[in-house]
């Protein structure tokens, strides 16, 4: 039987059906309403769920929810930074009300991405992996010893807030020197503009770097060093064998991956880190929907 999955983000809310082999069989989405009214946002989520449930003839073996963070696993609530209308929103209870009798599991979007890649994408066969996304922010999730690691509240794997420069720039989290405040797409582009580059965003920056623009190349090298420092740190803490990088900025391909891998050698000196691989994600935007189904199949959360 299929698993119904929901992926909640700041720009869209998607729902889908994932079969027992981890294949996405159906998908529908709605833009996330820009509103202060929590019920308007819920109405959009509910529509995607109702459409998907209709597609399945009302028969699903459970529901997996992937949500932007922070989340609170113990009470099944979410407070996504990019959805201000939802603070402490009781998503697990609401979804259970729409799909009566189904087991409903909740996970952070980083964790679900990592699980999706572990099941069907670049992480197949890896035992200890970090899945991470570099886009407007930097997020991630951990699969350790083959199992999702949620942490105490469900927020483990928030690698965007690993501090890589203790005197670094202020971060949106209230801290400073976080890798997100240096290497996220908007921060890469902002730094390049400060150096005299005239483009707009990280996509244009990647194109400029690929065309040989010197400032754009330096911006990627600088961001890649920050990402490599974070990867070395998390790799050492968790004894990882694989890091999977997805998200809009990772679409830059070798422009990002080559300097990350080169810098990683200078940060990851310990013997047990020499085999740590950094590879591109394979599932793109589908990873969260597929990973949320893995969450349902793996037991209580
Ligand atoms: Zn931070």
Image (cartoon, rainbow, N blue to C red):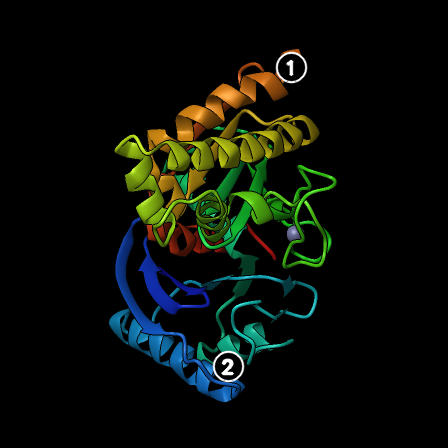
Q: Position of residue 164 (x, y in %)?
A: 66, 37
Q: Earlier in the sequence, mark 2 or mark 1?
A: 2
Residue 52 in sight: yes
Crowd tier of the residue under label 2, counting other residues whose Cα lies within 10 Å: few below 14, some 14–19, many 20 or above: few
Crowd tier of the residue under label 1, counting other residues whose Cα lies within 10 Å: few below 14, some 14–19, many 20 or above: few
Name the residue rendered at 46%, 68% in the picture. Answer: 10
Q: Position of residue 104 (x, y in %)?
A: 52, 66
Between 38 and 180, the residue placed more toward the observer is 180
Query: What residue is disc 1 on?
Result: 269
Quadrant of the image containing the C terminus: bottom right
Real-space CA distance between mark 2 and mark 1, rounded to the nearest whole angstrom: 51 Å
Element type at mark 2: helix
Q: Position of residue 275 (x, y in %)?
A: 53, 16
Query: What residue is disc 2 on?
Result: 97
- Whether 147 is drawn above or below 190: the answer is above
Residue 58 in sight: no
Between 122 and 198, the residue placed more toward the observer is 198
Find residue 117 and name its label.
none
Quadrant of the image containing the N terminus: bottom left
- Whether 289 is drawn above or below 58: the answer is above
The image quarter in which residue 208 lies: top left
Q: Are marks 2 and 1 in contact (CB under 8 Å)?
A: no
Between 78 and 19, the residue placed more toward the observer is 78
Element type at mark 1: loop
Q: Position of residue 215 (x, y in %)?
A: 41, 36
Name the residue rendered at 67%, 53% in the picture. Answer: 170
Name the residue rendered at 56%, 52% in the picture. Answer: 299
């Amino acid at each position: 039987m299929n698993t119904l999955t929901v992926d909640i983000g700041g720009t869209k809310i998607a729902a889908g059906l994932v079969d027992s082999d981890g294949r996405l069989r159906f998908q529908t989405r709605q833009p996330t309403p820009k509103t202060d009214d929590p019920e308007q946002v819920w109405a959009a989520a509910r529509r995607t769920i109702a459409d998907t449930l209709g597609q399945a003839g009302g028969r699903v073996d459970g529901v997996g929810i992937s949500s932007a963070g922070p989340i609170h696993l113990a009470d099944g609530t979410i407070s996504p930074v990019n959805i201000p209308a939802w603070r402490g929103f009781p998503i697990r209870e609401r979804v259970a009300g729409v799909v009566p009798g189904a087991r409903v599991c909740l996970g952070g979007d980083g964790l679900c991405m990592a699980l999706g890649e572990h099941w069907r994408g670049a992480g197949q066969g890896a035992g200890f992996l970090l899945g991470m996304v570099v886009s407007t922010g930097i997020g991630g999730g951990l699969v350790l010893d083959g199992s999702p690691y949620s942490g105490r509240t469900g927020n483990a794997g928030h690698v965007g807030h690993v501090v890589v420069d203790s005197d670094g720039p202020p971060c949106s989290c209230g801290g400073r020197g976080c890798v997100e405040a240096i290497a996220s797409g908007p921060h890469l582009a902002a730094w390049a503009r400060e150096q005299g580059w005239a483009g707009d965003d990280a996509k244009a920056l990647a194109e400029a770097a690929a065309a040989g623009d010197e400032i754009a190349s330096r911006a990627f090298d600088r961001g890649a060093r920050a990402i490599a420092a974070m990867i070395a740190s998390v790799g050492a803490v968790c004894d990882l064998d694989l890091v999977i990088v997805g998200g809009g900025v990772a679409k830059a391909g070798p422009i990002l991956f080559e300097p990350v891998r080169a810098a990683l050698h200078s940060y990851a000196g310990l013997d047990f880190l020499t085999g740590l691989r950094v590879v591109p994600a394979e599932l793109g935007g589908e990873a969260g929907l597929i990973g949320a189904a893995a969450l349902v199949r793996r037991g209580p959360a």
